[in-house]
Image: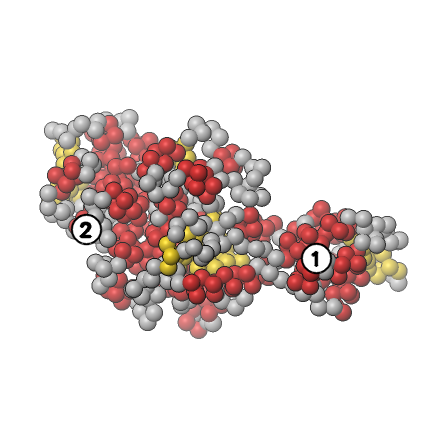
Amino acid sequence: MLNIYDAESMEKYSSAVTLSDMEIFIFPELMYPLVLANIMSPVIWSWKNEKWFAKQDKLNEYRKILRVKQYIMDHYDFNLDLDTWGLTNKNIEKSRFKDFVDDDTLSKSNALFGYEGDKYYFDMDIRKHFGLEKYDSDVIPYWKTETPEAMKNFYRKEGYHKGAGECVSFSTLYYASLFIMAGVPTERIMMVATPLHSQNFVDVHDGLLTNNRRLVTKNMWFNGTVLSYKAKRALVNEHITFVCNSKGYIHRIYSEATLPPDDFFDFKERLQDFLITDVTYEILANFLREYNQRQQCFQFETERFGKTMYIPAEDVYRYEHSSPYQIGTNTQTKLLDSIEEDEFYSNSLEGRISLKAMEAFFQDNDIHIKAIEEDPSIITDQLSCICSKAPLIVPDLLEFCKTKPLLPSYEGKIYVEQTEDLTLRGLNSREEIITYLSSLKETSETVSLAFMAYRLIEGDNWYPFIKAVLERNPVSLDQFSTLPLEQVAEILDGFSVESIYSENRLAQPDEVANFKTGDGLEKALLLWNVARQQDKEKPIKLHIKGAQVHLVVAEHHYTFPTIKQVKLPENFHQTLKELGLA
């Protein structure tokens, strides 16, 4: 629970406000609280009033999930812009977390501190990939996980026309929306975080993966398209840092785990089943689509005017790009028929294997992936006498058909049982859920952190919230720190007066700066951040009196109207001094 005089507690609770990728890496126990905050938010519950979901109750579970997916696709963009939440410095972040993780572990586990992935990212300049090459090598972005409110309000930001968010934001949005809108139990969703990505595994049918805005089915995982290849990169190439859901979490670097071992092993088995397939002709065709350098070993044959004609495999795959027909399916013949005759050869092409013969082979034989692993000759015998590169195909085919997820290990972990039930079983409305969680707020740290991420700022929660206001809002400083405070106040007066957060919940300064809207109290907090940046010695006092909020900076008074009915703790400013925040 929050102890404002304990540095670790203040870091954790203030991190529940800013929720940067670095903070969630250090504090994996923040991830499910963010999901709970999303579930408490009115944003997703408001989707129930949308026409798109009018017949949602009449659909089966899978169709409900697809409706949620399409709504997210239509209303949100993926955003990883460096300027959205500003920049910080490696040394600042290392100093913050030096008591939690050592530099060597950090550099091996976090993309911003040296990690470059096991395969795909090994030869890749990570900083150039993310647009950081123009900055000093110590500069890193504040990639903050957006709340549903922040995601929804991106349309207010210049250059955006609808909502937006980064990968962790989408994973938590999906988690909450699948529970609220599709009725998927919280324990059947598992969040999977790697150093460069975050997604969910949903235990439905053969399994589903959420991937930013999209969903990936098992069939899509193995279809060999560019889109699926991009979706696969994280699980194919990276160690999984942690997994978590409503039952708990397990983290690669921490010795304690709160996810029950049985739940972890059940998830591990389901994920492994999702990531493996037996070999059929369709899978071979999909493999060649992704591993296109292997296409040169194959040819297609078809009948034209009573004659057998031949065409290089790569030529057919090229035609497939602009065709509704697909190789390896029942539309393959239509694809071949759509190709002009002068592309074909009258004689079989030397050194190329007939895919028609391979199709017949797979029709006559059930080829299990385990059998190929034990005896590669099952495949190589069909290929090697024709194509000299055939021995190279089988290792690639095995890699395509079987992804081995690099999960954390339970070996050596200490299981710490969670006493409270946070699966939300039997709770069917936002009001019921908030009432239930409120009853646990004083006894469950997970729930206490959830209300922090929910931005319900009251009592001692004010102190980590103010810590976040004054230490982790660089965008508002970039926009306003060189201007006189009077001019900043005037600009803020010109912003919309609407808070992006309903009720008495509060935005951070950079949310106000990005979306150019905020309640008077939120504008006063932004001004406080700027004033403190300009002169840390000036005394600053915040007062809330009825419908007005007053920020007093030295002898200058700045007043804003507010509809937030919140109270500051007693001895607020004295406590801030004791905490080094004033």
| Residue 51 visible (yes or no) | no
Q: Residue at x 34, y 69 (%)?
A: 425
**Amino acid at circle 2:** Glu
Nearest the camera: 266 or 507?
Answer: 266
Q: Relative to 137, does residue 37 appear above or below in the rendering? A: below
Residue assigned mark 2: 458
Q: Which residue is mark 1?
A: 285
Query: What quarter of the picture does the C terminus occupy?
Result: top left
For marks 1 and 2, give the CA distance.
Answer: 59 Å
In this rendering, position of residue 321 left or right of residue 405: right
* Left-right relation of 104 to 287: left
Q: Which mark is residue 309?
A: none
Residue 374 occupies quadrant: bottom right
Q: Position of residue 385 (x, y in %)?
A: 84, 54
Q: How many residues crowd mark 2 within 10 Å: few (<14), some (14–19), many (20+)?
A: some
Q: Position of residue 118 (x, y in %)?
A: 55, 44
